[in-house]
Structure formats: C-alpha cells, structure tokens
Amino acid sequence: MQVDYTLRLRNVVMIAFGAAIYAFGFVYFNMANNIAANGIAGLTLVFHALFGIDPTYTGYLVNLPLVALGAYLFGKRAMVYTIEGIAAMYFFIWLFQRIPFYVDLQQDNLVVSLLAGIIAGMGGGLVFRSGGTIGGSDIVARVIEDKLGIQLNQALLGFDIFVMILSLTYISIPQMMYALIASFMYSQVVNLIQNGGYAVRGMFIISDQSEAISKRIMEDLGRGVTYLKGEGAYSGHDKKVMYVVLSPTDAREVKRIVADIDSKAFLSIFNVDEVVSPEFIVSRSKYHKQLKL
C-alpha cells in the first residue's frame, strides 16, 4: 500500500513538473514568437491571436467538457491524471504570462521552433510517462476511434492537421513551416522522454543449431533466451524459434555469434518500445566485468 501511494505521489509531482516545462516553452517561445502549436493548445493560440482571449481560459473551457466526456466513456479513475495535467498546464500558462521573461534568440525562427519543440517535448514526455495528458485532443481521438473505427494515431493526426489549418488565419505559410518543425521536434522528444532513452532490440532466430546459439547467448552475454514452437509452412518441419531481448550492442554481438555457428540462420531484428520485467536491464556491463574477473 505504501509503495502504491509513493508511486501515485511521484506521478502527481512529475505531471505537475512536466506541465510547468511545457507551459514555459508554450508562453516564452510559441506565444512570444507566433509559432503555432498542435492539439488543443494550438487551438487556444488561434483564439488568442484572433480574439485576444487568454489561452488559459480557452484551454479550460474547451478541455472541461472533453474531460467530462472522457470520464463518462472511459471511467473517472482514468481521468484523474488527465485532469491534473490539464489543470497544471493552464495554471502555469496563466502564471508565466504574468512573469516578465525574454529569451533573446535574435529573431531566428528556426532556432525558436527547434527550442519550442524540444522544451514542449520534454514537458509532454514527463507528463505522458507519468500517466497524464496535457490536452483533450487524445480524448477526442479516442472517441473517434471507438465510434468510427479510425485508428488513434490517425485521429490525432487529423485533429492536428485541422488545428494547423486554422492557425493559417493568423500566421503565414512560412511561419507554418516553422510550426511543423516544432511539432516534429516535439514528437521526437516526447518519444525519447516517454521511453526514458530506452534503446532495446528484439530478435527472432530460426536455426537448426538453436541449442548451440542459445548457449552462447546465455554464457557470453548473460541474456535469457525463450524457445517458441514453430513449423515451416512449406517443409512442415518443426523448428525451435529463439526469442531474445537485447541492447543494441548485444544485438550486434548476437549477429556475430549466429554467423559463426550457422551462416544460414534466419534473423529478424526489431525495435522494442518497453520491457516490463524485474530481471531485464538494458546494460549488462556488470555481467561483462564479472566474466573478465
């Protein structure tokens, strides 16, 4: 119970911290330099530019009905961190607008857009990593996914395109290009932060020398190997399919091991977003040191 409480408290703190970082970039880079943003935050910039409405007020007015809809469709517990993320972000947007601060980038829009995307990505990544959100666009996308069968990422992309088109009412097309750069940087940094700099490879290996290969992987690299039962569709022969999760460095070592033992083996290597296991760590440097000793 104590562990669960500590985890929840940590999530609450990290969501607030991430929301503050996002709001900092939003106010001092996007708003200050007319760089459009995607999602609900981008929509608030449209209202701010056209009607002079504080993004804080627009953000709350747009997001509150969406949160209520999300709580009705997906349950109240699922919305707790979402509510905190939205409330914290627009509070900090309100606060930072009242704190005089200027970042002198010599009116270089490329640098501004890059920094806007990086800072927003850092904040958004921390919020998402802790289970929260910083806007209701994902709720809209989930509703579209449930009701229309459109995939979540496609629905999010469609909403972002809609907001970007609306943004052309107050920015020029060249400025829109800078907004797209910021949006691209945002997505890349969010993925990096969300995964904690995670770099893991998964590998399927099919070989008649499966015992020898798995033994070398376990002894040389200290990685576990799982056997899956396979059958050749053409030959009808049973095969042992080896599945192993590795760091990028270890993946190169396994390719070398397999080539040494069975040059005709089949390998399939792919990126792994996350591994949840108390026994798995990305780096095996300690293991290698023990072997040397």
Image: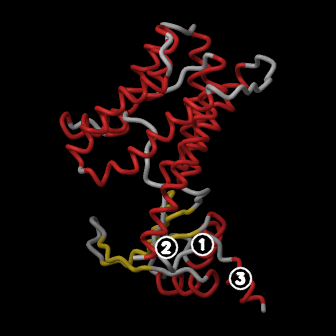
Give the residue displayed 38% in from the left and 44% down from the top: 83
Label number found at residue 254: 1
Report which residue position mark 3 lands on: 288
Label number found at residue 241: none
Quadrant in the rendering for residue 8 = bottom left
Label 1 or label 3, whichever comes before in sequence order: 1
Q: Tell whether label 1 touches label 2 (CB within 8 Å).
A: yes
Query: In x, y percent, where is residue 207?
Result: 45, 75
Quadrant in the rendering for residue 142 = top left
Give the residue displayed 65% in from the left and 77% down from the top: 284
Residue 35 drawn above or below residue 94: above
**Which residue sits furthest left?**
147
Q: Residues within 10 Å of mark 3 (few under 14, many from 20)?
A: few
Q: Three-letter amino acid code at disc 3?
A: His
Report which residue position mark 2 lands on: 244
Give the residue displayed 64% in from the left and 38% down from the top: 119
Query: Gap between marks 3 and 2, in whole Å?
Result: 18 Å
Q: Three-letter amino acid code at disc 1?
A: Val
